[in-house]
Image (spheres, grey):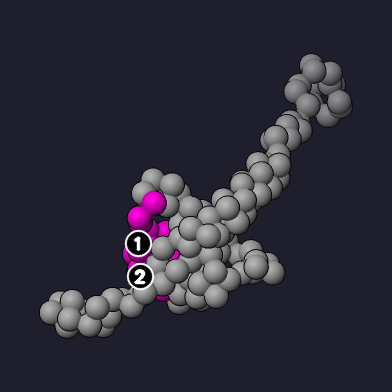
């Protein structure tokens, strides 16, 4: 199941991040603020994307043990990791996004420059 009908920049960046981190370490777990910090997005942008990826089955989530956050004086975190059953779908989507981005890159169009002085007197001074 596709988590998005329309892929926003945040959704694309989060999906790429998750895929890259999983490729580096298949046991990689992360929490929302960590992704927000790494990608320079606000948590209000990140958490809806993470929830949709979980609902689609692309990510698995678990709540942090109750004792750890109390000891550190913060609310419990939700940890996420790639669902190995849907790793293929994530990798395929990232490959499609990368291919689309590469094909949309255009070669720079040369800028027209003004004509240079040809030495021809067009009238005025010097007559």
Q: Residue at x 51, y 72 (%)?
A: 54
95 relative position to 58: left or right: right
Give the magenta part as a residue range. Answer: 26-43
Please identify the quarter of the rendering in which residue 69 is found: bottom left
* Quadrant (top left/top right/bottom left/bottom right) for the N terminus: bottom right
Q: Which residue is mark 1?
A: 29
64 relative position to 61: left or right: left
Q: Residue 64's x, y, as percent?
A: 28, 76
Q: Residue 118's x, y, as percent?
A: 80, 18
What SS does tag 2 mark?
strand
Please identify the quarter of the rendering in which residue 5 is found: bottom right
Return the residue found at the far left: 71
Nearest the viewer among 80 and 75 is 80
Q: Residue at x 60, y 56 (%)?
A: 89
Please identify the quarter of the rendering in which residue 62 is found: bottom left
Q: Residue 78's x, y, as percent?
A: 35, 75
**Magenta run includes residue 61:** no
**Res. 69 mark:** none
Q: Residue at x 86, y 27 (%)?
A: 123
Gap between marks 1 and 2 measured at Cα? 6 Å
Q: Residue 32's x, y, as percent?
A: 38, 70
What SS does tag 1 mark?
loop
User: How many C-alpha atoms fall within 10 Å of the one at disc 1: few (<14), some, or many (≥20)?
Assistant: some
Q: Which residue is mark 2?
A: 79
């Amino acid at each position: 199941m596709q988590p998005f009908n329309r892929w926003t920049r945040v959704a694309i960046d989060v999906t790429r991040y998750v895929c890259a981190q999983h490729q580096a370490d298949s046991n990689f777990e992360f929490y929302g603020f960590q992704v927000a910090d790494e990608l320079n997005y606000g948590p209000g942008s990140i958490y809806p994307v993470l929830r949709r990826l979980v609902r689609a089955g692309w990510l698995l989530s678990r709540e942090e043990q109750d004792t750890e956050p109390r000891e550190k004086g913060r609310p419990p975190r939700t940890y996420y990791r790639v669902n190995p059953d849907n790793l293929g779908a994530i990798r395929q989507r990232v490959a499609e996004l990368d291919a689309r981005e590469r094909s949309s890159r255009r070669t720079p169009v040369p800028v027209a420059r003004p004509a240079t002085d040809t030495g021809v007197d067009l009238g005025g001074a010097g007559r």
